[in-house]
Each structure stands twice: as C-alpha cells, then as structure tokens.
Amino acid sequence: MGSKERRLSYSIAFKIEVVNYAEKHGSRAAERRFGSPQTEKMIREWRKQRKDLIKADKSKKTSCSCAPKRPKLEEYVKNWIIDHRKKGTAVSTKIILIEARRLAIEMSITDFSGTTSLCERFMRRNGLCMRTKTTIVQKLSHEYERKITEFHKYVINMRKKLCFEIRHLGSWMRYL
C-alpha cells in the first residue's frame, strides 16, 4: 500500500454479502464482482471471519472485538474507577495507570506495560470516558445582587458622563 493510499473500512453487512457471494462463486469471482479495493486476500480473510461477522452488530464497520489480554485485571480496574467516581473522586488517566500497575504487580503480571494508549483502549472497551465529576460548586457571594446593581449604576453613570449610546457600550468599556 502506497503512502498516499487511504485504508478503507467496510460495513459488516457488506462483508457478509461479499463472503456469501465468494462461498458460491469463489474469492476471485467475488473480487471481480465487488470491485478493485477488495482484494482476493481480503475476501479470504473475511471468509475466515464469517462466524464472527454473522454474530457482530451489522451497523458497525469492524469486526474487531478488541478482547482484553487480561480480563481479570480490567475488571478490577473498572470496578475501582466506578467506586471512586461514586465517591465523587476525580480519576485521571495517570491515576488509572498507577492503579493498574499496582494491581498488575499484586496479580504477578510481569509483562504489563501500562501505557496511555492502553488506558484509552480500556476506557473505550468498557464504555468509560475521561470526564471529571465536579463535586464543589462555586457559591455566589451574599452580596451578589448588590454588586450587580452597583455595576449597572456605574455603567449608566459612565454612559451619561462620557455621552455615548448604549450600542457603543462594548467599545467604551475597554477605556474604563
């Protein structure tokens, strides 16, 4: 594949259609029928994946299951994240990786890399997102209404003093 060529993705429904045709007529015939991007090798790969393709969600474009290498570790980390979020504690990528490494050592897993991309894939697989829940709400001052009223009075007085129309307020505010 040349550097300028883009990789294409195909829907699972399309792959199944190509595989069904290839089952009846052969992979080369399917390649001729469905066009040039689908190579014979690609069709052979899809034929090997036939069972997985039939089971997969037809609206998606990939059949990659991205199954975790260490499902037990992932389950512990997922539960840890959920518990911390329930308590209102913010959980960042770095904190997740530190906890995952600690758990990997506890579970005697020696080949665990604990990279950021691994964390991102883990989050995507488990339907988690990197949002932080805020627990502390900024409280308005007790004098909030009085300060707003004072500000309005100040603007009105300055407008009268400098003799400008309300539509020019934004232009004059930078000089105050």
Image (cartoon, rainbow, N blue to C red):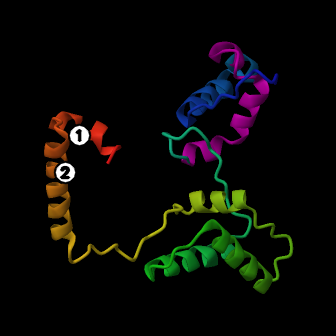
Q: Is residue 144 left or right of residue 61?
A: left
Percent across and percent down for residue 3 are 80, 24
Percent across and percent down for residue 38 are 70, 23
* Disc 1: which residue: 169
Tell me the crowding category of disc 2: few under 14, some 14 to 19, or many 20 or more residues within 10 angstroms, Cα based: some
Give SS at disc 2.
helix
Q: Main secondary structure of the magenta part?
A: helix
Tag 1–tag 2 contact (CB < 8 Å):
yes
Residue 38 colored in magenta in the image: yes
Image point (82%, 22%), residue name? 2
Q: Amino acid at mark 1?
A: Leu
Per the rendered image, the range of residues in magenta is 31-55
Give the residue furthest to the front. Answer: 161
Answer above or below: position of 7 versus 119. above
Percent across and percent down for residue 39 are 75, 22
* Disc 2: which residue: 155
Q: Is the N terminus in the top left, top right, bottom left or bottom right quadrant?
A: top right
Q: Nearer the viewer, residue 39 or 54?
A: 39
Q: Within the image, what quadrant is residue 62 found in?
A: top right
Image point (51%, 45%), residue name? 57
Give the residue furthest to the right. Answer: 110
Q: Earlier in the sequence, mark 1 or mark 2?
A: 2
Give SS at disc 1.
helix
Q: CA distance from mark 1 to mark 2?
A: 9 Å
Q: Amino acid at mark 2?
A: Val
Q: Is residue 166 left or right of residue 136?
A: left
